[in-house]
Structure formats: structure tokens, C-alpha cells
Image: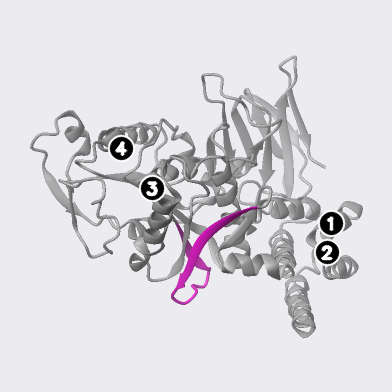
Amino acid sequence: MLFKKRMRKILLLLVLCGLFSAMDAQMSKTETKQFLRMLQAAPTFTDVIDSLKAKDYTLDSASIPMVREALWQRLLDDQRRNPAEKTAFEEGRIVYENGKVGRFSIQVKGAAPANGYPVYIALHGGGGGPAEMNDEQWEQMQRYYLNSIDTGIYIAPRGPNDTWNLHFDGDAEVFYSQILKHVRLYTGADPNRIYLLGYSAGGDGVYQLAPRMASELAAASMSAGHHNDVGPDNLQHVPMLLQVGELDDAYNRNKETVRYSKILDSLARQYPGDFQHQVYVHSGAEHSYVMDRRGPDFQANVISDPIHWLRNPEGAKTTTAVTDAPTWLSNFRRNPYPLHLKWDHYMVREGNDNYFWISYVGGRMKMSGFPVFSEVMAFPTQNRIEVQNLSQGISIHLHEALVNPKKPLTITVNHKDYKVDLKPSALQMAKSLAERSDRSYGFWQTVKVWKDVQDKVNIATEK
């Protein structure tokens, strides 16, 4: 074990030396050695952050991606020094919130792609009923979509309780948050190809979780579930596949699925290029007969025009389509830095206040009859970020995909411009990587925007 630890340190040192050899033109040799020595000497990543609080490093545009990768590798190395947690994850267990233990199955298929494995997280049916019923549903989901996946990591969580909303109560949100975190840290996954799927009660869960986990998902697939009036606004950058049986009329699942797709239609027209979605109503199918796992060669019989069917279900015309959920999902990759964000603050999961490259300040807003939205746009060529709607104070996390760190940033609020000097920081990058556990979200500066009691706009750089 000691030999393996030393080998890991040596390998990490070699990696970092290779990364930093290209940095001498941007950071002095002395600074490079200091940073490298600190990165290796710190017992934990928390100590890395503490060291950077004592001595931060200002980065330029050439250094930013290399420092981000070095910090990410150091964070991964830190996680590997906790073998008990990693072993438990590989065995399908996660300890979360007050010692609760969440269970799941995990299977890996195929050789790892260059950018890492795609990940398919599949939620089982069941819901309110005895534990034995939900255990049986979980067992089925452990293989349900598996044959449709050639290469990837397939995870089937056991809902953490046996209530009707077993996939989206507070316990479930915390549990699934931990699954996503551990997937990125331990599995060699591609963080930009994480997909969420679910059937029946699992479909209910997809409706609820996809908007709450939007900045971590590439796409989502809902089969035979009910939306329970969840808002779709946070699906702006999460393509959504909706499937239901024509005869699945319990709770009006069939009609409500199509009505939900109509809302997405409206949003897609309002925001061209966003809110991508597809709806399939399976002709003559009841609740348990949605053909969403038959592989890329199977053509299912579906209603040609679901909107017309909703108005006049008698004698609806049919067509054929590939309705295999993993096949549809695999067409999409997450963009971690979309230039336009419209965010319903209430639709976040427990313990999380982030939405792509913004977050809110001051705690989650309580429902008061209306959604609480922020709308933010980035204009990279202008080095400008415009806050079009500021319902609550927000933090804007900066990345070179959004702004040029060499130039001053303009933040526009209520048609008024505010200038911000950019100073990319290794400390801010380390803090964001530690918080998000996602290599795509290594932000190098954070700017807070809020209104005071006099409704005056305030802007400040986070230290």
C-alpha cells in the first residue's frame, strides 16, 4: 500500500511537471516550483485551498487550463486517498445525510472512450407500496436498459424510501447528488455525457430531477410518468425525450405527457435552439408497454401527430420511429457554458445553489405564487455579461469560454454598464472545483450582483 501511494505521488509529480513545463513563460520558475511543492505537500485538497488563501497565484490566459487540470488531478488524487468511500461506491453503497445508506447497482460495458464513459442513471418504477414491491422494481431496472447500451456505465439506484415520490423527496435529491459527484470522481466518466432515465415512478422522478440537476446532465428520458406540475424552464439546455402509451390513462399520464410537450414546444419557439425535445405516444400501448429499450434497429409504432391526437384521439394515424431511449440520449453532450441562462431559482435540488455558471446569493427563495427567475446572457466577443432579470442576488462564475481574461469585463444590469477588472485566481479555481467536483466547473473568478434595500445595484468580486 505504501509503495502504491508513493507511486501515485511520483506519477502525479511527473504529470504536473509536464503541465508546468509549458508555464514558465507565464509563471516564473520560482512560482512554478512553489505551486508544485505546495500541491504535493498538502495532505488534503482542503490544505491546498488553505495554502492558496495564504499565497494565491494570479493566472493569465495561457496558464488557466493547465492550472485547472493540475488542481483537478490533485483533487482526484485526494479522493483516491479515501479508499473506503471509493470501495463502497464500487460495491453500490453511498453514505449520505446523517449516516443514511443509499444503494444502487453499477455495471460497466465496453472499453473506455478517450473522453471517458457515458453514464446512464436509470430510475425504477413502483413508488407508494411495500418495500418488496420496490425492491422487485429496482431489480428489473438493473437490466432494463442495459442491452441498449454498448459502451457506458449503467447505474440503477434503489429509491431511498417507499413513498409515491421515492425518487424526488429531500432524501432522494441528496442521494442522487452524491451519485453524480462520485461518478465524476471515481469512474473515469465523461462529465459531459451523463444521462437520466426513468420509467413509471422513475419517469415521475425524471420530470422532477432533470430541472434540478440541469447543469450536470447531457439529456434526460421520461417514460410513462407524470409531471406533477413541475415547471420545465430549467430544461433550456437539457434535451428531453417523453414517451407514453396511448392507453396509459391512469392519472391522465397519456394526455399530460403530450400537454407537457406542448409547453416545451412553446419554449422552443421562444428560445430557438434551446428546449430540444421529442414526444412519442406508443399506439395501442398500455402503461407497461412503452417500447423504449429495444435497441437502435427497432421501429416502434407511434402516433404520427400527438397534438392532433390530444384533440381528437379517435382514428389517429400512426408511423414508425426508433424509440430506444439510450440511443436517443447518446446524440447529446452537455455544454457546461451556454451563453443564455434563464433560471427558475426554486427548481434546484436540496443543498445546491448552482445553475451552470451562476448561483444565487442568500438561500433558496420560497414559493410565493410565482417562479423566481434570473436571466443572464454572455457575449464573449464583447466581453460583456448582461443580467436581464435580477429577482435575487446572484454570483457569476467566470470561465474563458464566456469571457476573455485579458480584458476588462462589462456587466450590464438594467441597461447600465459596470466595469470589472479581471484577476484570474488559482484559489477561486480550487474552491470551485472542490465545491462542484466537476472538472468543467473550475472557475477562476466570481462576481456577485445584487440589489440593496434601496434597489441599488451592487457588484463586487469575491475574495
Mark with earlier residue (4, 3): 3
- Tell me if mark 2 has few (under 14), some (14-19) or many (20+) residues whose alpha carbon lies within 10 angstroms of its own: some
Q: Name the residue carrying label 3.
A: 126
**Residue farthest to the top?**
454
Q: Nearer the viewer, residue 458 or 105?
A: 105
Mark with earlier residue (1, 2): 2
**Chief secondary structure of the magenta portion:** strand
* Side of 78 relative to 157 (left or right): right
Between disc 4 and disc 3, the foreground one is: 3
Q: Name the residue carrying label 1.
A: 57
Mark with earlier residue (3, 2): 2
Determine the secondary structure under disc 3.
loop
The answer to which image quadrant residue 438 occupies is: bottom right
- Label for residue 27? 2
Mark with earlier residue (1, 3): 1
Q: Position of residue 195 (x, y in %)?
A: 45, 55
Identify the amino acid type marked 3: Gly
Identify the amino acid type marked 4: Thr
Determine the secondary structure under disc 2.
loop
Q: Is residue 13 above or below residue 399?
A: below
